[in-house]
Structures are given as structure tokens and as C-alpha cells.
Image (spheres, rainbow, N blue to C red):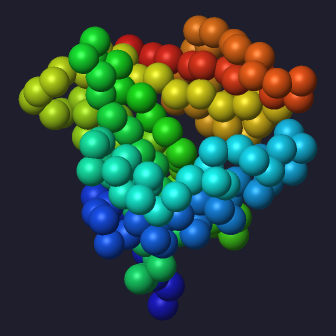
């Protein structure tokens, strides 16, 4: 009998597992853009713990293994900034990224204070799978920013 994936809030004890998964998941992005110095590959454990404490993080588990994660935080203007949606390579293309995205949006949409007005995230211009997922969930491109000769960040947004 197979196990099902469960999604729950992450805490500081999950940080090390999330960081290892993040390192694994962002290898393909680093290769795609020819840059292994991207922040997800250089982030420290303390920095990740601070992100979890300052916002909200979710993990998806298959049994005891963390196989996916996402983080978000809301700013003073009501913009929920969703970041680092990661899914273990062997778990991709099964809807887990979409489930996590829905779950983090749901958390902030139902959080009484502060009130979320919009969701915003970004990805690289060559990250077709990410762009496809975000657009399928109602996100629309609001800006682009060239951050280097090989990378343009695409910012997408939708109303809460």
C-alpha cells in the first residue's frame, strides 16, 4: 500500500531538511542559467530558520521525508510574497507544486490579520515549468528585471 503526501506547517526542526531539499532542487535552475552562486544554493541554515520564523512555511511529507516545501510572508501593503516552491525531482509532475501553492495561498487568504490583497512570486525567464504552473493558477506577469547576462526575473501576481 502506498503512502500519501501530507502538507503541514514547517517549523525550525524542518529547516535542515528543507535546506538540503532546496540545494537539490535548485541544481537544475543553476544549470539552466549557468550560475551556481544563486541565493537558494548559498543560503545558510540560520537564514532559512529566520525566514521560517518571520513568515509561514509549509512542507510536504511522504512518510517522514520532506519532499516539497514553500515559504511566504505578507508585507505591510498586503502583498504575500511566495518564495522557494520546491519539489523533489522524483516527485515532480504529479501536482504537488500546485497543491503547495494552493495551500500557502489558502493560509494567507484566511489569515485574519494582516489581510492579503495580492499574491506575488518570481521565477527565471527560462523556467518554463514554473511559468506554466503559475499561469495555470491565475498568475499574470507584472514585470521583468534583468539581473545578469543570462537571467531575467519574471514577476507574476494575482489578486487574493
Q: Residue furthest bottom?
A: 1
Question: Which residue is more in the foreground, 74 or 134?
Answer: 74
| Residue 14 point in image, percent of width and height | 37, 69
8 vs 4: above or below: above
Q: Which residue is drawn at the image coordinates 56% and 53% (left, top)? A: 43
| Residue 70 point in image, percent of width and height | 45, 49
99 vs 10: above or below: above
Residue 156 placement: quadrant: top right
Residue 147 placement: quadrant: top right
Q: Which residue is drawn at the image coordinates 48% and 90% (left, top)? A: 1
Question: Which residue is more in the foreground, 118 or 22?
Answer: 22
Q: Which residue is drawn at the image coordinates 24% and 17% (left, top)? A: 76
**Res. 138 visible in picture:** no
Side of 60 relative to 144 (left or right): left
Q: Which residue is drawn at the image coordinates 41% and 83% (left, top)? A: 64
90 vs 98: above or below: below
Figure quadrant of the C terminus: top left
Side of 5 relative to 155 (left or right): left
| Residue 132 point in image, percent of width and height | 69, 32
Q: Residue furthest left?
A: 112
Q: Residue furthest top?
A: 142
| Residue 142 point in image, percent of width and height | 59, 9
**Res. 77 visible in picture:** yes
Amino acid at each position: 500500500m502506498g503512502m500519501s503526501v501530507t502538507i503541514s506547517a514547517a517549523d525550525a526542526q524542518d529547516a535542515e531538511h528543507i535546506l538540503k531539499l532546496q540545494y537539490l532542487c535548485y541544481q537544475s535552475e543553476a544549470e539552466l542559467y549557468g550560475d551556481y552562486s544563486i541565493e537558494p544554493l548559498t543560503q545558510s541554515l540560520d537564514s532559512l530558520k529566520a525566514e521560517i520564523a518571520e513568515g509561514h512555511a509549509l512542507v510536504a511529507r511522504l512518510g517522514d521525508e520532506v519532499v516539497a516545501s514553500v515559504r511566504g510572508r505578507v508585507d505591510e501593503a498586503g502583498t504575500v510574497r511566495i518564495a522557494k516552491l520546491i519539489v523533489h525531482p522524483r516527485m515532480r509532475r504529479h501536482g504537488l507544486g500546485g497543491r503547495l501553492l494552493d495551500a500557502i495561498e489558502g493560509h494567507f487568504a484566511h489569515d485574519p490579520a494582516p489581510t492579503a490583497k495580492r499574491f506575488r512570486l518570481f521565477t527565471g525567464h527560462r523556467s518554463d515549468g514554473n511559468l506554466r504552473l503559475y499561469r495555470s493558477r491565475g498568475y499574470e506577469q507584472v514585470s521583468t528585471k534583468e539581473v545578469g547576462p543570462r537571467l531575467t526575473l519574471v514577476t507574476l501576481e494575482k489578486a487574493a
